[in-house]
Image (cartoon, grey):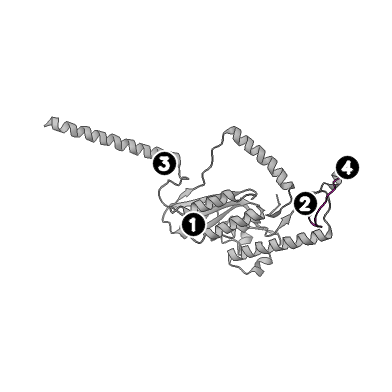
Amino acid sequence: MAKKRHPILIILVILGGIALFLGTTMVIVLKVIGPSSSLSFGDKIGVIPIEGTISNSDMIISQLVEFRKDKGIKAIILRINSPGGSVGPTQEIYREVRKTIKTKKVVVSMGEVAASGGYYIAAAANKIVANPGTITGSIGVIMNFVRFEDLFKKIGIDMEVLKSGEFKDIGSPHRKLTERDKELINALIGDIQRQFEEGVAKGRHLPVEEIQQIADGRIFSGAQAKELGLVDILGNFQDAIKIARNLAGIKGDAILVYPKKARLSLRDLLVENAAKLVSDVFQKMKTRMEYRWSGF
């Protein structure tokens, strides 16, 4: 009889070993992938950070599309800490947020600064949460021109330009803007400004005339912005999570999923930071239309 039980015990031991191995493997996998992985179980909220000057929209848009398609992600939080940036990328992100709210709730959590283009993007979301002291607003357009005309004269450099039309070299660093140049550029700025005002009015469900009254580039605290209807709720990132859970109908806690980050070596990180620093210096000297607050 004991001989008959022996194979059964062996089978039970083997099954127990397999179960232990699988359980241990699962724990290790969950530890490695962490709560930011799309492989996590349970209801999830995607978190997309938007930080610094906005000069490119590709990565943020791809993250929005990825989270929008992921059926396990029930809502998305945009954590914005940005003074704004270039008009084109800002409008592209705004448009993608407007597409996303048709299928998933999007909540904005403002950090220290969410001004100009940073606010433009926020206006596209379902709800905006700001700290009372968040710097926001700055609804306006700015265009900077760098001139080297006097420097060229001092060092003996002369530039001669042949052009097909009067305005072909408008904004060039080697000459001053003429009055006709300024009229043309101001008309362009006015059109881009109108687009900003209409985008905010549409996103916030406010009359354009109401937005125009405060769209002179002035900045607001989060508390002031709430009084003006530019912000829905005063609170921090945890409050934004709670609001996103409620909007998505999530009961209990939710797992936060962040975009995957490529791992860089120390050398690559140093090279990347150095390149970014040099690029930022030249970008600031570059003439371009921006939804950007230039404070601080």
Q: Type of residue at label 1? A: Ala
Q: CA distance from mark 2 to mark 3?
A: 52 Å
Marks 2/3 in contact by CB < 8 Å: the verdict is: no
Nearest to N terminus: mark 4 or mark 2: 2
Residue tagged 3: 30
Q: Type of residue at label 2? A: Phe
Quarter location, residue 157: top right
Nearest to N terminus: mark 2 or mark 3: 3
Q: Measured from the top left, where is residue 133 in percent x and y? A: 62, 54
| Residue at position x 43%, y 59% in the image | 249
Residue 145 is tagged as: 2
Residue tagged 4: 154
Main secondary structure of the magenta stretch? loop
| Mark 2 crowdedness (10 Å alpha carbons): few <14, some 14-19, many ≥20 | some
Marks 2/1 in contact by CB < 8 Å: the verdict is: no
Label 1, secondary structure: give it. Answer: helix
Q: CA distance from mark 4 to mark 1?
A: 60 Å
Q: Quadrant of the N terminus?
A: top left
Q: CA distance from mark 2 to mark 1?
A: 42 Å
Q: Measured from the top left, where is residue 58 in percent x and y? A: 58, 50
Label 4, secondary structure: give it. Answer: helix
Label 3, secondary structure: give it. Answer: helix
| Residue at position x 80%, y 58% in the image | 181
Nearest to N terminus: mark 2 or mark 1: 2
Magenta region? 156-170
Instruction: Report how many numbered discs are placed on residues in the image.
Output: 4
Residue 244 is tagged as: 1
Q: Give the number of the mark in front: 1 or 3.
A: 3
Q: CA distance from mark 3 to mark 4?
A: 65 Å
- Whether the magenta-drawn stretch holds residue 252 is answered as no
